[in-house]
Amino acid sequence: MKKKLRILILEDVEEDATLIDRILTKERVEFTRVRVDTRHDFTNALTDFQPDVILSDHALPQFNSIEALEICKQKKINVPFILVTGAVSEEFAVNCLKCGADDYVLKSNLSRLPRAIQYAIRQHHYENNRMKQEEMLRAQNEELIKINKELDSFVYSISHNLRSPLSSVLGLVNAAKLDDERTTETVDQYFQMIEGSVLKLDKTLQEILDYSRNTRTELEIAEVNLEKVIVDCFEQLKYLKGYGEIVRLI
């Protein structure tokens, strides 16, 4: 553990806290610690001291480790919580672990404490990384679902816009073949209509190319002059029917 740990000790006996200091110092653990023994001081220390590890005795005069764990949950404090207490039953130890404690160390066997702290920190590190990776995967999946929906909509629109002018061209060609009384005027009309359908088809293909280029282009963020945008919009509206009615409604 290269980092100097901030250890919050919930303990009402200073001698026991000092013994913890000696054990950690002997194992060359670099740390700074704060000892508290009341609910009020414990709650404040979580915010003010921001511990990396919490070492908690179980039974204090007006407070206990289960309540301390509950406070950590409420405040969403995600740091190792290790119970350091006297002799306890196996049932009690299991219950503490179920409540959220990472480990428990008996005061009669404090030599195990440095390894317990190191292991708990490592486990939290792995768990935090796992949760971050899961969140990244979740965000990526949501983005893929959104892209797929947009792609489906785009494909449907493009399919319609491609097939519609093609159908028109084929229909006009067939109509021209079946027209026994073709004149120069009717042929010109057919050609104009075919040209219009081909232009629509060309426009759709150009939109596909533009879309493809835009997906490969990096987004450029720039300031927008809203006043100019509004003025330009009103200038365009002047050429539309009903401009006076729009202005009156505004």
Image (cartoon, rainbow, N blue to C red):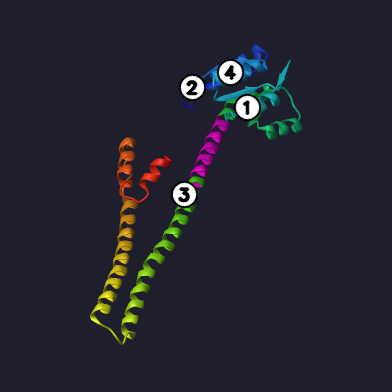
Amino acid type at image mark 1: Cys
Quarter the C terminus occupies: top left
The kind of secondary structure element at disc 4 is helix
Q: Residue at x 51, y 46 (%)?
A: 138
Measuring from the top left, give residue 198's x and y in whole percent.
Answer: 29, 69
Q: Is residue 216 above or below residue 99?
A: below
Question: Residue at label 4?
Answer: 45
Callout in the foreground (3, 2): 3
CB-based contact (under 8 Å), mark 3 and mark 2 = no
Q: Earlier in the sequence, mark 3 or mark 1?
A: 1
Image position of 28 (left or right of 247): right
Measuring from the top left, give residue 45's x and y in whole percent.
Answer: 58, 18
The kind of secondary structure element at disc 1 is helix
Q: Nearer the viewer, residue 146 or 22?
A: 146
Question: Residue at label 3?
Answer: 143
Callout in the foreground (4, 3): 3
